[in-house]
Structure formats: C-alpha cells, structure tokens
C-alpha cells in the first residue's frame, strides 16, 4: 500500500482563497483585520514561521503588525509589547511566537493577552472555553490536523486516535478537539512517560505525532491503512526538517501528511481563519 498524501499546502491554499473573499467583504463594511506577531530572539525556525504568517496575511489582505525583541529582552519588556497590542485598535488579533527564550515566564505572557485578541487560542481563558465546550478560537495546529482529516474523508467518528506529545500548542489541546461530540474520537495521549508506545500505536486508526523526536514512528508500529499526521520538527545537521514519522510508514499507512508541506501550512491557514472569524464577529 502507498498512502494517500494529506496535502497541507494545497488545502491551505484553498482556505486562503476563501478567506481572501471574506476579508474583502469585511473591508467593504469598514473593517480591516490586522494580525500582530511578537517574536522574541533570533531562532531561525521561529523567524521563518513568523515571516510565513505575514506573507499569508499579505496574500489574503490582512494587515500585518510586527513586533520584534532581542533574545535579551526582559519579562517586563515583552509584557509592555503585549499591553501595547492589547490596546492597539488596528491589531484585531495577535500571537506570541513560541517558544520564548529561557527564563521568560511564558504562561504569564499568555495570561496577559486580551483573550478576545488571542489569535492562537492558547490564552487560558480560551483553552478553558474549549474544555467547557464554549465558542473559542481553536488552537491552530490541532485545528489544522482536523481540517486535513475532514478534507480527505478520514473517518474520525469512533476512531482510535493516538496523540504522541503533550506540548501546549498541539499535544494538550489536540485530544480536547478530537473528543468533542462533533468529532467523537477515542483518544489515547502518549508522552515520554508512556511505557510501551508501540502497543498503543499498533491499535491506532489515526496517529498524530507531535513529539519532536526524529523518525519515532516506525512502519512496524503502524496499523495498515491508518492515517498518520507528522507534526514533529527536528533538524538534520544540514538544517533540513526531519519529522517524527519514518519515511517507510508511507508503505503501510492509508494516509500520511508530508513534513514539510503537511500540517505546517495548515497551522498558518488556521491562524488566518481565527483572525477573520474574530473580525466577522466584531461586525455581527
Ligand atoms: N504562538 C505559536 N507558536 C508556535 C506555534 C503556534 O501554533 N503558535 N506552532 C509552532 C510553529 N508554527 C507556528 O507558529 C509553525 C510551524 C511550521 C510552519 C510551516 O509552515 N512549516 C513549513 C516548513 C517551514 C520550514 O521550511 O521550516 C511546512 O511544514 O511545510 C508554520 C508555523 C511552534 N510555535
């Protein structure tokens, strides 16, 4: 078997084309959505992701507001920029690019954001709303995973899903999305403390690999026909992306997301969706 590709690049392009029309309609009503980003430090990966987010904004007509601070920025300096974007009427939604440099209290920064401007869905109020099943902006990567699965007709209802990883951007919120009544999946969350990862993976209809551990998911651990989403990013010595999923998995799985070209572009597209939806709510 050769797996069908879950093409994140193509799916993101379709989403952006829909958003372009919605942004134009908002502008006719006098509202220009504006995405702010706060980037601290000089991590090349983060710089690339933020640059991509602003490229996407330009494509669909969303205004860009960029704030950059050096790696030496203090907690107070970052908090001052958060307060500034909270107050800026041109900034309808914003994100703080994660991770922040060591020594910065990331949770405190997220808590300080105006939850109504939280374009990432990572403010504790919005994560709480997700737990309570109330409307909230959805975390971009997990929502991107769901959108890809739906687009390619992968059955989620009743599926056994294994999520590998427990980070704040993917691992923690992913099961919350998958276990909503609208999705009705059964989720097992695995992490570095899981005793026998292989035994869990072998039962999974869908695997979401977000461990950041190169080629952790091996062909022999995957049930034939399963859908495998590769979210993890490690870098080779040459700086190339190495995913969590071994290339041989493509011979066993029913669907596989490439990496790059899978969940990454979907993360960016879902961010724009959150920004546009917030602007649409503001006009009623
Ligand atoms: N505030 C946030 N920080 C981080 C998030 C997030 O959702 N919000 N997620 C990740 C990084 N991320 C988004 O910011 C992200 C990751 C990957 C991509 C992407 O388009 N990747 C491309 C490859 C790019 C490359 O060549 O390096 C792909 O997969 O095709 C976009 C955004 C952590 N931080």
Image (cartoon, rainbow, N blue to C red):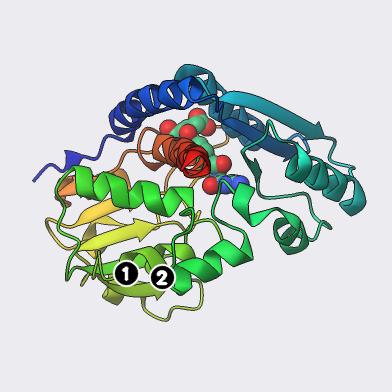
**Residue at the spot 25% in from the left edge and 65% down from the top edge:** 182
**88 up-or-down from 139: above or below:** above
Mark 2 vs 1, N-terminal side? 2
Residue at disc 1, CB closer than 8 Å to ligand 1? no
Picture coordinates of residue 47, whole percent (x, y) = 66, 31
Picture coordinates of residue 245, whole percent (x, y) = 35, 50
Left or right for 102, reference 151: right
Check contact, mark 2 vs mark 1: CB within 8 A.
Answer: yes
**54 up-or-down from 170: above or below:** above
Using the rendered view, name the quadrant where residue 126 is placed.
bottom right
**Circle 2 or circle 1, nearest the eye:** 2
Disc assigned to residue 180: 1
**Residue at the spot 43% in from the left edge and 20% down from the top edge:** 24
- Specify the farthest residue to the bottom: 195
**215 up-or-down from 13: above or below:** below
Disc assigned to residue 133: 2
Callout 2 secondary element: loop
Q: Nearer the viewer, residue 135 or 242?
A: 135
Picture coordinates of residue 38, whole percent (x, y) = 72, 39
Q: Is residue 166 visible?
A: no
């Amino acid at each position: 078997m050769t797996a069908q590709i879950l093409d994140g690049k193509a799916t993101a392009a379709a989403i952006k084309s829909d958003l372009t029309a919605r942004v134009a309609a908002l502008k006719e009503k006098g509202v220009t959505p504006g995405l702010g980003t706060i980037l601290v430090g000089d991590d090349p990966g983060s710089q690339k992701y933020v640059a991509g987010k602003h490229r996407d904004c330009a494509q669909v007509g969303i205004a860009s507001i960029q704030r950059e601070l050096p790696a030496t920025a203090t907690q107070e300096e970052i908090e001052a920029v958060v307060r500034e974007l909270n107050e800026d009427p041109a900034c309808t939604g914003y994100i703080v690019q994660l991770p922040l440099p060591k020594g910065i209290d990331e949770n405190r920064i997220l808590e300080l954001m105006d939850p109504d401007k939280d374009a990432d869905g990572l403010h504790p109020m919005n994560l709480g709303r997700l737990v309570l099943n109330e409307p909230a902006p959805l975390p971009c990567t997990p929502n991107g995973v769901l959108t890809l699965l739906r687009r390619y007709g992968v059955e989620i209802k009743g599926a056994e899903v294994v999520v590998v990883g427990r980070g704040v951007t993917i691992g923690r919120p992913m099961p919350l999305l998958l276990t909503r009544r609208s999705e009705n999946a059964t989720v097992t969350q695995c992490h570095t403390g899981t005793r026998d990862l292989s035994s869990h993976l072998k039962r999974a209809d869908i695997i979401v690999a977000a461990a950041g551990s190169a080629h952790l998911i091996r062909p022999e651990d995957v049930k034939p026909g399963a859908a495998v989403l590769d979210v993890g990013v490690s870098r080779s010595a040459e700086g190339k992306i190495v995913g969590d999923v071994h290339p041989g998995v493509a011979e066993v799985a029913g669907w596989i997301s490439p990496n790059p070209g899978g969940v990454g572009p979907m993360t960016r597209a879902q961010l724009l969706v959150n920004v546009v939806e917030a602007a649409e709510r503001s006009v009623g």
